Amino acid sequence: MNKVQRQDVPSFKTLLLYAPLGMPLAFGALPVYLLIPHLYAKNFGLSLSLLGVILLAVRLLDALQDPLIGLWSDRWAEHHQGRRVLILLGIPGMILGFYGLFNPWPGMIWLSLSFSLIIFYLFFSVTSVNYQALGAELSRDYNGRTWLTTSREAGALVGVLLAAALPDLLMQQWGRVHGLEIFAGIFALFLVLAVLPLQKPGMQRPVVGERLPWWGFFAALKHKPLRHLLIIYLLSQSANTVAGTLFFFFVDEILGAHSLAPLFLLAYFLSGALGMPLWLWLSGRFSKSLAWRLSMFVAILAFLGAFFLRSGDVWPYALICVLTGLTLGADQALPPSLLADHSDQDKRSRPGSYFGLFNWVGKAATALGAGLILPLLQGLGYSAGQDLWALSFCYALVPALIKILAIILMGVWSVEGRNSLVPLLGGYHE
């Protein structure tokens, strides 16, 4: 590592200031991604097909807005010399949308769900795109980028641990309505506290780059390794979304262990947090792409094992949660770090545009995963207590098959953006 690279490695103080916002963003995103399908199907009576259509439509809309948000954010941040105000801008809207999701309007459940999701996703995108882009701007060092994304995702894993445990505890203590209201209040408090460290002057970075028309946002897709990265990320996230959407259904119907659901989630996310150093070491010792591929292989084995579980198999499922949790750290930290490397090598673009594109793909994956698996599950004949083979098939084998396709593609495609000649030549080369 040369002198310039050493100077660009983020300090421990920078990591401490950058990481906290990852916690409330994940704290808010997890229930929307994990709890909402089960809550609205079981407690508010929406059919799986209607719920799938709403999730697909709203999440696709959310995905489509991210490229424009990324482009607009870059232009605004360039003019105002930083992203701090943009990160703050999304906070009130996230709080409003999150509260509405857990307190729907009586008699208009489907409309309330749609409206609250749109509000939450819009303002979540404004904050998260600029927060991710700031991480790319704080360091241009190959391994330094991984430290930043790992610190962010470590904060995120703390958030999901809390989000996994609190709803059930609060509803047991205060009832469903008041418990979820308190949950929304805790989310608001965490958001406000976590965004304050980013207002330090040292966390402001100038944003520079060539100004492009809105359609120029997609120009980065002409680079083959970046296309490969986004396709594999789409597949990996779709598989994760399928399993996440059906988690509570699987625990309730297949295992008959509803009361253990928070513990399974804690095992999953805690394993993800503890596994972060492993993927960080592997990515530095070998490469980010190799570490990511290895994590997918572990996930495939775990999903295949889940297909054979039956009622009462709580310990084998706990082991599966630990194994899939270990792979979570790689899924969360390595793809955005790879993307930041690609952004560095494209001198005509800026990180906000790249992360807007990245989030667009990730959200399209969640839209497809959740929006298609619920109608498929119903189409295979599943209903509460009946045709449980369909639930096992959709929860376990569908994600495994998607991950298998992703790992095969990673074996023949390059997704790395690192090229030591690029900074000297001033351009992006494949």
Image (cartoon, rainbow, N blue to C red):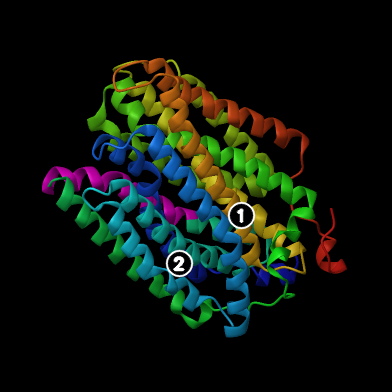
Residue occupying image coordinates x 66% and y 55%: 339
Q: In terms of secondary structure, where does tag 2 sit?
A: helix
Q: Nearer the viewer, residue 266 or 182?
A: 182
Q: Is residue 319 toward the left or the right of residue 230 in the image?
A: left
Q: Is residue 299 above or below residue 382?
A: below
Q: Which amino acid type is marked by label 1?
A: Phe
Q: Where does residue 54 sit, x and y in percent of width and height?
A: 42, 44
Residue at position x 20%, y 56% in the image: 181
* Residue 253 or residue 264, whichever sits in front: 253
**In magenta stretch: residue 164:** yes
Q: Quadrant of residue 352?
A: bottom right
Please, what secondary structure does the residue beneath circle 1 have?
helix
> Residue placed at 41% from the left, 22% from the top?
391
Amino acid type, callout 2: Leu
Q: Report crowding for label 2: few under 14, some 14 to 19, many 20 or more residues within 10 A (C-alpha).
A: some
Query: What's the mark number on residue 358?
Result: 1
Residue found farthest to the front: 107
Q: Quadrant of the N terminus?
A: bottom right
Quarter holding residue 389 = top left
Instruction: For residue 323, say whether it is visible.
Output: no
Residue sitting at 62 percent across and 73 percent down?
Answer: 74
Mark 1: few/some/many CA within 10 Å (<14, 14-19, 20+): many
Q: Which mark is residue 16?
A: 2
| Region rendered in magenta | 153-174
Label 1, label 2: how many angstroms apart (C-alpha)? 24 Å
| Quarter of the rendering containing residue 264 | top left
Front-most of residues 345 and 387? 387
Residue 191, percent across and down? 35, 65
What secondary structure do most residues of the magenta stretch adopt? Answer: helix
